[in-house]
């Protein structure tokens, strides 16, 4: 019997055999299209020397293909009920290590140190639950992580936000937070019909190439992100109004306006029109007001 499960029939068979019930609360939508799974692995540029971290292997359809291509795969699954299914679907592979736990809560550093050689670049591949996409991505992009590339399936609208450029409707604080740390590109759009059960929205696969150096240099990183979040707090308001209402105070209007004009930024612009470079300049120029 072929143990590859990248089809609706094979996935249904193994789920029924183990009397497994999918939990909507965990965002369990299993991908059951072999072509898309292969395209994800190709987009991640995985070869025989690759070390891979997979988040949320589910029943193991993507894990099987990753293991067939990579040197080693470490998979982290939140639902321990899947352990007998994964033991069956991955039994032919001796290069897969399974860990059970919430990736947001477990000691990911310890797992990476245990499973991969020191300083080895690691590729992340995942079909992420929609409800925890952003916190997982921000954890993966932390400076201490050894990831060179992150290729994840996420909600199509969220993928658009990660890739968005100034002036686009999807451009926002999340776009800047991710692009500060990585180069983002959507590599594949995925219809909801290739999942079991079908979600309510379409998905996209986005590739994040983690930058060795951050996209811009700022004197105070924490203030930079506070500035960005404040600038998008009320999208219809001008940059000046957002900064007065969400970061400084109305008493500092003249000082804020003066800094904006000194930096060549029209106070009447909206936050979604500014580039990450403009935000970096404003952050360095405005931080003195925050420390008054």
Image (cartoon, rainbow, N blue to C red):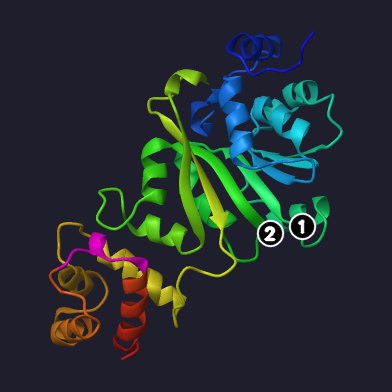
Name the residue carrying label 2. Answer: 146
Count of marks overlaid on the render:
2
Q: Is 43 on the left or on the right of 227, as rendered?
A: right
Q: Is residue 272 magenta?
A: yes
Stretch in magenta? 269-276
- Mark 1–mark 2 CB contact (< 8 Å): yes
Quarter of the image with the C terminus is bottom left
Name the residue carrying label 1. Answer: 120
Position in image of residue 122 (x %, y %) = 70, 52
Q: Residue at x 52, y 25 (%)?
A: 29
Q: Is residue 168 magenta?
A: no
Q: Above or below — where is 57 with respect to 285?
A: above
Position in image of residue 268 (x %, y %) = 12, 70
Res 97 → quadrant: top right
Q: Is 291 on the left or on the right of 48, as rendered?
A: left
Q: Residue at x 56, y 26 (%)?
A: 36
Q: Residue at x 25, y 82 (%)?
A: 263
Looking at the rendered structure, the secondary structure element under dot 2 is loop
Q: Bin the neighbour count of mark 2 within 10 Å (Cα to Cα): few under 14, some 14-19, many 20 and up.
A: many
């Amino acid at each position: 019997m072929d143990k590859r499960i990248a089809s609706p029939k094979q996935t249904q068979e193994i789920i029924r055999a183990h009397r497994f019930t999918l939990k909507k609360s965990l965002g369990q939508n299993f991908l059951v299209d072999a072509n898309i799974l292969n395209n994800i692995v190709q987009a991640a540029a995985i070869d025989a020397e690759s070390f891979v971290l997979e988040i949320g292997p589910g029943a193991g359809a993507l894990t099987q293909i990753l293991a067939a291509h990579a040197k080693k795969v470490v998979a982290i699954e939140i639902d321990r009920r899947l352990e007998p299914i994964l033991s069956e679907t991955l039994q032919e592979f001796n290069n897969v290590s399974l860990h059970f736990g919430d990736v947001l809560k477990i000691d990911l550093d310890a797992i990476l140190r245990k499973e991969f050689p020191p300083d080895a670049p690691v590729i992340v591949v995942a079909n992420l639950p929609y409800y925890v996409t952003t916190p997982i991505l921000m954890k993966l992009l932390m400076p201490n992580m050894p990831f060179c590339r992150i290729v994840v399936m996420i909600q199509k609208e969220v993928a658009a936000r990660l890739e968005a450029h100034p002036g686009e409707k999807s451009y926002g604080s999340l776009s800047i937070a991710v692009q500060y740390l990585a180069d983002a590109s959507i590599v594949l759009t995925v219809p909801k019909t290739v999942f079991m059960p079908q979600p309510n929205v379409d998905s996209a696969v986005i590739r994040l190439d983690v930058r060795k150096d951050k996209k811009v240099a700022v004197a105070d990183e924490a203030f930079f992100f506070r500035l960005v979040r404040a600038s998008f707090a009320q999208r219809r308001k001008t940059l000046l109004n957002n900064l007065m209402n969400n970061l400084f105070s109305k008493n500092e209007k003249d000082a804020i306006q003066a800094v904006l004009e000194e930096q060549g930024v029209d106070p009447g612009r909206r936050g979604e029109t500014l580039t990450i470079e403009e935000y970096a300049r404003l952050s360095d120029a405005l931080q003195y007001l925050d420390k008054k």
